[in-house]
Image (spheres, helix red, strand yellow):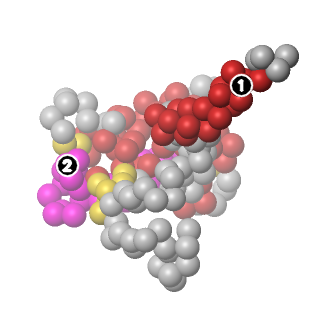
């Protein structure tokens, strides 16, 4: 047994250096949905979910969306959720619509802002009106056409991983 002791000691002594080299080469993976590491640069360009949906309505692939493309696109997206052809969807149906077309069931616009007559139902007309308002708000040059540049939101970087109050995120 004493004969193997120097060999075992040599192997154990080499372990910290080996482990250190492995950790330097092994990429760190974060759990899904945990966001960027704290030292990562925060994005300065983002896309609102409603802007992403509107961009998907570019029927002719020219990189521009017009109201003539938006209207039938919204109708198709509404019909995909209103499978009973009732002509309106409830707030749960709207959450399904938002999940499918905006990427999250809680994305804006909220069902409360879309439901113009406050009857707890959302009609195609109400949805089209809400997206038309979003279209007008995003149309920065007011030419009636949305370009990809208009659909981007530029955020000022707060730097240093701090929020607007100076608190660490």
Give the residue furthest to the right: 1
Residue 137 spot, x, y in % from top left: 32, 63
Q: Give 46 or 4, whichever is nearer the viewer.
A: 4
Q: Main secondary structure of the magenta part?
A: helix
> Does residue 155 lie above or below 77 as drawn?
below
- Where is residue 74 shown, x and y percent of the image? 41, 39
Residue span colored magenta:
123-150
Image vertical order of residue 115 relative to residue 5, above or below: below
Q: Quadrant of residue 76?
A: top left
Q: Secondary structure at mark 2?
A: strand
Residue topped by disc 2: 147
Question: In front: mark 2 or mark 1?
Answer: 1
Residue 59 visible in the snapshot: yes
Residue at left 76%, top 17%? 4
The residue drawn where x is 25% and y is 30% is 59
Q: Residue at x 57, y 56 (%)?
A: 110
């Amino acid at each position: 047994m004493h004969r193997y002791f120097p060999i075992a000691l040599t192997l154990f002594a080499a372990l910290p250096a080996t482990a250190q080299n492995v950790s330097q080469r092994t990429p760190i993976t974060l759990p899904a949905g945990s966001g960027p590491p704290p030292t990562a640069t925060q994005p300065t360009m983002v896309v609102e979910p409603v802007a992403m949906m509107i961009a998907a309505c570019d029927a002719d692939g020219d990189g521009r969306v017009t109201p003539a493309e938006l209207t039938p696109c919204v109708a198709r997206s509404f019909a995909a959720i209103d499978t009973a052809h009732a002509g309106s969807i409830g707030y749960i149906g709207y959450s399904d619509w938002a999940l499918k077309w905006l990427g999250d069931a809680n994305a804006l616009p909220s069902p409360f802002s879309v439901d113009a007559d406050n009857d707890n139902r959302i009609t195609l007309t109400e949805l089209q009106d809400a997206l038309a308002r979003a279209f007008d708000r995003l149309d920065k040059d007011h030419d009636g056409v949305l370009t990809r540049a208009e659909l981007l939101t530029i955020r000022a970087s707060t730097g240093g991983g701090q929020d607007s109050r100076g608190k660490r995120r």
